[in-house]
Amino acid sequence: MTANSQASRNADCQVRGITTSRYDHARSDLQFLLNNEPSYRIDQLWQGLYGDLADPCDITTLPAALRGKLAEQLPEALSEEHRSTSDCGETIKWVWRLADGSLIETVLMHYEDRSTVCVSSQAGCAMACGFCATGQMGFDRHLSTGEMVEQVVRAQRASGNRRVSNVVFMGMGEPLANYARTWAAVERIHGALGLSARHLTISTVGLAPGIKRLSEESLPVNLAVSLHAANDRLRDDLVPANRRWPLATLARACAHHAATTGRRLSFEWALMHDVNDTLRDAAELADYARPLAAHVNLIPLNPTPGWPTRGSSPNRVREFAAELVNRGINATVRLTRGLEIDAACGQLRASLSTVDIGTARSEAPPSLPE
Ligand code: SAH
């Protein structure tokens, strides 16, 4: 094992407490566990863990004694605390308990043409967006790379022969505040689990330095920015990170990302009654989104106990979307999925477990190369 990988493992262990997910280990780390074994064992183990999503006990290409040893050395990090299913089995939501007792969520959503897993990148969140259930909880800790990858593996196991095709980092936490581990998870999900980069999306409140860093990575992933307001006065209030990276700074980072990766940018906009759902708000959003060729996802706010504002009425949502379209912006209105299963965290239900109810296209949509 190199000094670097040992150091990053130590750092992860410090973050996580005692145990490590089996998916935290880089291939070189696993090689280290197979010290006196023939060299082809690493391929068998890697294929077992990532190709077959198997428990080490069940990797039958390995000798029984080695399986037993690896099973002890390579535990899973996520233990199922709660699982709920809705939409006739098309949406599954998990609450996982981690080794230190922290609770996180994962959602699997099947659509006709894809299956998407929404993963958490942190337990809790430090970004303090008042309307967000996770923001209201505060920050607990970063997740390790393995804890993120394992969410995808566990969802894929439950998904059977419907292959998980998309991963969105839109669960609990701010992925760009946990940059190195999140990026390592992206690389593992791409390289070892075989998902295409164009099917991976990182969602952020708008940490401009993190967005710039993303732009420099060799793997071009999609970027979603939780915008919610297109003037600094309102956004400072709704998304406190805006006070540090105001809209002009954010726009520069987004433009750089789009230019260097060729990926489409999308803005998330939770429509809040009389807060950000007027025609004037739509006009501001259009002016902000147009030069960035951004796609807008509209979701009526899911009210949470700490932020009693209600979501916009269906009429307001329609008017808002129509105004965007008139102003040349592509917008998708989303409807909440998994309504009856949401227990602890309103955030996922409102913003992610969604199903498209219509994409409104402007006459001459701004376009970026895919
Ligand atoms: N921190 C990242 C990812 C997690 S939040 C980010 O902010 O993008 C995922 C999405 O859910 C964000 O767009 C967030 O603004 C949205 N969201 C949070 N609480 C919500 C609520 N109560 N109703 C609707 N959307 C919400």
Image (cartoon, rainbow, N blue to C red):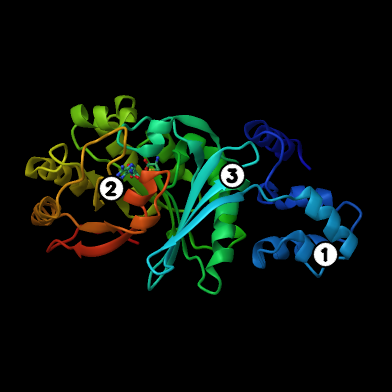
Q: Label 1's element?
A: loop
The correct choice, above or below, for 267 with respect to 275 in the image is below
Q: Is residue 149 at all visible to an observer of this figure?
A: no
Q: Are marks 1 and 3 in contact (CB under 8 Å)?
A: no
**Depth-wise, is mark 1 or mark 3 nearer the camera?**
3
The residue closer to the viewer here, 323 or 249, is: 323
**Number of residues whose C-alpha sits closer than 10 Å to that of mark 1, classed few (under 14), some (14–19) or many (20 or more):** few
2 or 3: tag closer to the N-terminus: 3
What's the distance in space between the residues labelled 1 and 2, CA to CA? Answer: 46 Å
**Depth-wise, is mark 1 or mark 2 nearer the camera?**
2
Q: Amino acid at mark 2?
A: Phe
What's the distance in space between the residues labelled 1 and 3, CA to CA? Answer: 34 Å
What's the distance in space between the residues labelled 2 and 3, CA to CA? Answer: 31 Å
**Number of residues whose C-alpha sits closer than 10 Å to that of mark 3, classed few (under 14), some (14–19) or many (20 or more):** some
Q: Are marks 1 and 2 in contact (CB under 8 Å)?
A: no
- Horizontal side, residue 60 vs residue 26: left or right: right
- Horizontal side, residue 324 vs residue 171: left or right: left
1 or 2: tag closer to the N-terminus: 1
Q: Which residue is mark 3?
A: 97
Q: Residue furthest top?
A: 243
Q: Quadrant of ligand 1?
A: top left
Q: Which mark is residue 40?
A: 1
> x, y percentage for residue 173?
45, 39
Q: Which residue is mark 2?
A: 267
At horizontal 49% and vertical 52% (from top left) the residue drawn is 106
